[in-house]
Amino acid sequence: MSALLADKVVVVSGVGPGLGRSICLRAAEAGARVVLAARTESRLKQIAGEIEDGGGRALVVPTDITDDDAVTALVSATLAEFGRVDTVVNNAFAVPSMKPLARTDFAQITQSVELTVLGTLRVIKAFTDPLAENAGSVVNINSMVIRHSEPRYGSYKIAKSALLAMSQSLATELGERGIRINSVAPGYIWDDQLQWYFGEVAKKYGITPEQVYEQTAARSDLKRLPTPDEIADVVVFLASEMARAVTGHTLDVNCGEYHD
């Protein structure tokens, strides 16, 4: 891992406390200079501090990816600081409504598509020229929701399915400029948020959090749930030269819960 992204510049949009943080840290550990973009500046500074404490370089750029001017400023700040861009990772996340589509507010669906799909497209369009200069890559974080049709995930599946279709189209359109576009589709991610949720489920049904974990993990081939770092490692791989012939692909990272 230590040299996979040596001297590369990786922009991560949608940096949260779970997977987003892991992507930033693992990219830095692989040698990349990392640009952190999200709305919450305090979180960005905290994660950037972790990168710098580990000997890496990081740039914090508070960004709303639904705003054209903000995304333009992100590109300008990145090029001013590092002079190049090699990979853009799009990890923007809209909390799903968790209601049947018949009872889902259209405004919620619109907001989800605006952030997850159009926000990601806005970022990719803005970075296309600098990415093309270095035969760069894009990694879009999708979701295992594209592999199933479970109740209450309808609005989330609409947005993530559109993100997948857009990613595939962009792989074809930008391939002639040397830009690779790939996706990573996690399922459950064993992070602090999921641990809290499993604790709440355990209370509801009068069982232990460990039993909730075991019942959930039992549906996967490896009988466990992936950690944020394990998913971030796949992102690093797709951003690296080791994946230089991979584009238009979606890599499922779910310990075998679903098979494409």
Image (spheres, rainbow, N blue to C red):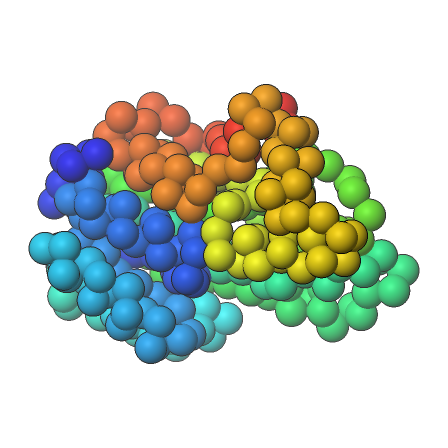
Q: Residue at x 53, y 58 (%)?
A: 193
Coordinates of residue 80 in the picture (x, y in percent): 15, 67
Task: From this view, report whether residue 163 is shown above or below residue 78.
Answer: above
Q: Is residue 137 left or right of residue 54?
A: right
Which residue occupies the foreground of this view, 195 or 230?
195
Q: Is residue 133 left or right of residue 117?
A: left
Task: From this view, report whether residue 254 is shown above or below residue 82.
Answer: above
Coordinates of residue 238 in the picture (x, y in percent): 35, 34
Q: Residue at x 23, y 56 (%)?
A: 34
The outermost residue toward the right is 102
Rendered-image quadrant of the N terminus: top left
Which quadrant would residue 13 be assigned to in this image? bottom left
Coordinates of residue 113 in the picture (x, y in percent): 63, 61
Q: Residue at x 35, y 71 (%)?
A: 43
Rendered-image quadrant of the C terminus: top right
Residue 125 visible in the shown view: no
Coordinates of residue 244 in the picture (x, y in percent): 29, 27
Which residue occupies the foreground of this view, 86 or 195?
195
